[in-house]
Amino acid sequence: MSVLAVVLIALVALLHLGFLVLEMFLWTKPYGLKVFRQSREKAEQSKVLAANQGLYNGFLAAGLLWAIVGQRVDVALFFLGCVVVAGAYGAATVNRRIFFVQAVPALLAIVAVCLG
């Protein structure tokens, strides 16, 4: 894989590690409430679901890091594709912003992997 592809995959992995932290540990904290634009009450009611989402984001990050360490193009494309699907679904069901934060970086990484 090219250096650009590795950097972009690492960026996507870091984003998902950040989502893990936000959803698993900061969901009901002031920063998490601000990022997700929700009330403390709503956050308390949904914190178990958010932690589950965070765990899945951790799995995506782990898969992307596995792809980098093993220089596995197939693994990179699989996990980047999962990120794109998750981002598109989030954009369609929650907020269009999710597409730009989650799916666009993964799409750029896919292009870099395919060109590399």
Image (cartoon, grey):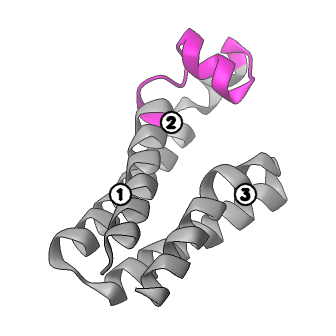
Write the residue at 43% across / 34% down: 24
Q: Residues within 10 Å of mark 3 (few under 14, many from 20)?
A: many
Q: Furthest-left residue in view?
A: 70
Q: Measure the C-alpha gap from mark 2 to mark 1.
A: 27 Å
| Boundaries of the magenta span | 23-41
Number of other residues with Cα within 10 Å of mark 1, as a class: few under 14, some 14 to 19, many 20 or more? some
SS under mark 3? helix
Q: Amino acid at mark 3?
A: Phe
Q: Quadrant of the N terminus?
A: bottom left
Let me know if residue 27 is in the magenta part.
yes
Residue 64 at what x, y percent from top left? 34, 66
> In terms of depth relative to the viewer, which is nearer, 50 or 67?
67
The structure residue drawn at horizontal position 37% and vertical position 78%, both measured from the top left corner, is 76
Query: Is 66 in front, or is 25?
Result: 66
- Residue at x 51% of width, y 48% of height: 53
Mark 2 = which residue? Answer: 48
Q: Earlier in the sequence, mark 3 or mark 2?
A: 2
Q: Which residue is mark 3?
A: 99
- N-terminal label among 2 and 1: 1
**Across the whole image, how many numbered discs are drawn on residues?**
3
Q: Is residue 29 left or right of residue 61?
A: right
Disc nearest the viewer among 1 and 3 = 1
What residue is pinned by disc 1?
A: 10
Q: Position of residue 70 (x, y in %)?
A: 16, 77
Secondary structure found at label 1: helix
